[in-house]
Amino acid sequence: MSYRFTSTRFVSVSVLPYLVMIAGLLVAAFLIFWNLGQGSIDLRDEALTAGRSLYIYKTHDILGLEVNGVPSVRKPPLVYMLTAVSYRLFGLNELGLRLPNAVMGLGAFFVVAWGALRTLGPAWASLSAWLLLGCFNIFRVSREALTDTSLLLGLSMALIAGFLELWFKGDVKSTRRLPALFGIGVFIATFGKGLVGLYAPVFVLVAFLLLNSGRLRTYLLVSILASAPLFIWMVAEAFINPDFVSIFLGQEYLERLNYHSSFLTQFIRSPLWYASNMWRWFRLTGLVAILLGIWQLFMCLGNFRLRNSLKRIEAVNCPALIYLNLSWLGYFLMVSLASHKSRRYVLPIFPLLTLVYLVGFKIIWDDIIHRSSRALVIVLICASIFAGGVALASHYRRVPDYLPGRKAAAMALRGYLESGYAIYTDDDHLAPILHFYLDTIVPVVSSLDDIKGDRTKWVWVTDHPVIGAKRLAGYYIIVHSP
């Protein structure tokens, strides 16, 4: 017996949507992991991740985090703990450093596909990864050792679990695993990124309270248990580090609300900066998703003619749609208020916008009768995927190579280190890079006179020309034997 593509029976049993969905996830995986272990590491957050992870790798201590021998306790330790395990498995190299973050970045694609599959079915879920591919910043962050991927994955998992809870209206069979997945997401977001991860449990609990969810107490208990590791770690840090509260709460959080900050002078931008960049970051998919989200809110909250015009409005789960749209909008408004802005901080809204996009078109599709109207929907979806693909192609970095000169300087010093030399530098930006590649603390000094001790030989790396120095990749390496 043969089936035509228009056959209802064929569509219901076809594996084609699953193949399309898997293909999209494989493309995302390829683009995230391709050449991940090549190139050189970045100066700012990637070097900090490398140093803190190296400290845990060496000492197994998650409290007294250091970078090149200098205390550096500004983030919770989950990402650094995972990276230390990755060091053990893959070595002290770029792959070992970046792999945990790459896995978490790819996890966001799986979470969106899972959420769409559970709510909309395989046909619409097959589009999820292809649409999210257009958010090229996810690939930039996933291919660099940052803590932002933990926030991306954790918030996506927790907020989508809450969406599914409302979508299935508390059905025990459909929702029995959701509280556990919600808790895992809260744990990843809070213990990986910090207090900003509390947005997920706070929003979900308030939404469940207002939307009359019957499992509010369950999610309250899970929220407390999942966020407890963060608060236990914070209390322990406050006891052993007298500056922890002022650094972790003052500089890392309160100072980010100060538009006249003298501490965070970089990336201070206006409240509308995120809104003005939405088209650039998510192209047509983001624009259409926002319009569909506004329409969904009006449809569910207002008494509009548009609501009455839909033939299948009775089948639409309005509490779930209200939750879904307010979940990304609330986070978007929260990060927009911060003075210190980066494209990395807004990433958690894009998986949610992808679901808004798919849910909106699914509602419209089910209400359409004419083929020409359905063809228009197909064209718009294809245009969204194409526009996102063009943006990704123009912004994708094939090799994550940030500071090749500093890596070259570190590689040139390995032989000296193995021969018993001590390494010093007067460049505090170079020191964390040397610390990672040489697997040793590199003291920062201001001049040759500052180097003291009973060592018989040492190497000094500097940005400035010195008589008798060897120039390598922009740095002068002086071999000295007093």
Image (cartoon, rainbow, N blue to C red):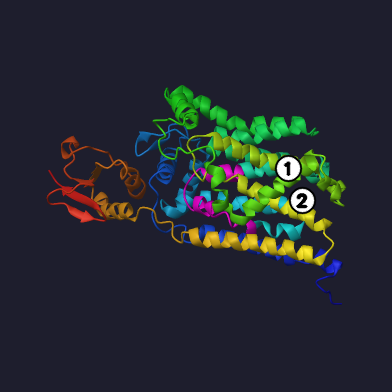
Q: Is 215 positioned to the left or the right of 287 in the image?
A: right
Q: Is residue 177 visible?
A: no
Please tell me how crowded label 2 is: few (under 14), some (14-19), or many (20+) other residues with Cα within 10 Å.
Answer: some
- Quarter of the rendering occupied by the C terminus: top left
In the displayed image of the protein, which residue is found farthest to the bottom? 1
Of the pair 174 and 321, the residue shown nearer to us:
321
Q: CA distance from mark 1 to mark 2?
A: 9 Å
Look at label 2 and name its amino acid.
Thr
Q: Which residue is mark 1?
A: 163
Q: Which residue is mark 2?
A: 119
Of the pair 241 and 475, the residue shown nearer to us:
475
Total label count?
Answer: 2
Tags 1 and 2 touching, CB below 8 Å: yes
Q: Earlier in the sequence, mark 1 or mark 2?
A: 2
User: Image height check: is 422 above or below 366?
Assistant: above
Q: What residue sits 54% from the left and 59% below the top?
A: 391
Q: Dividing the picture into quarters, in which one does residue 176 lie? A: top right
Look at label 1 and name its amino acid.
Phe
- Quarter of the rendering occupied by the N terminus: bottom right
Residue numbers of the magenta segment: 130-154
Q: Is 306 positioned to the left or the right of 343 in the image?
A: right
Of the pair 416 and 42, the residue shown nearer to us:
42
Q: Dividing the picture into quarters, in which one does residue 26 lie? A: bottom right
Q: Is residue 213 visible?
A: yes
List x then y, in percent, for residue 413.
26, 52
Badge 1 marks a residue whose secondary structure is helix
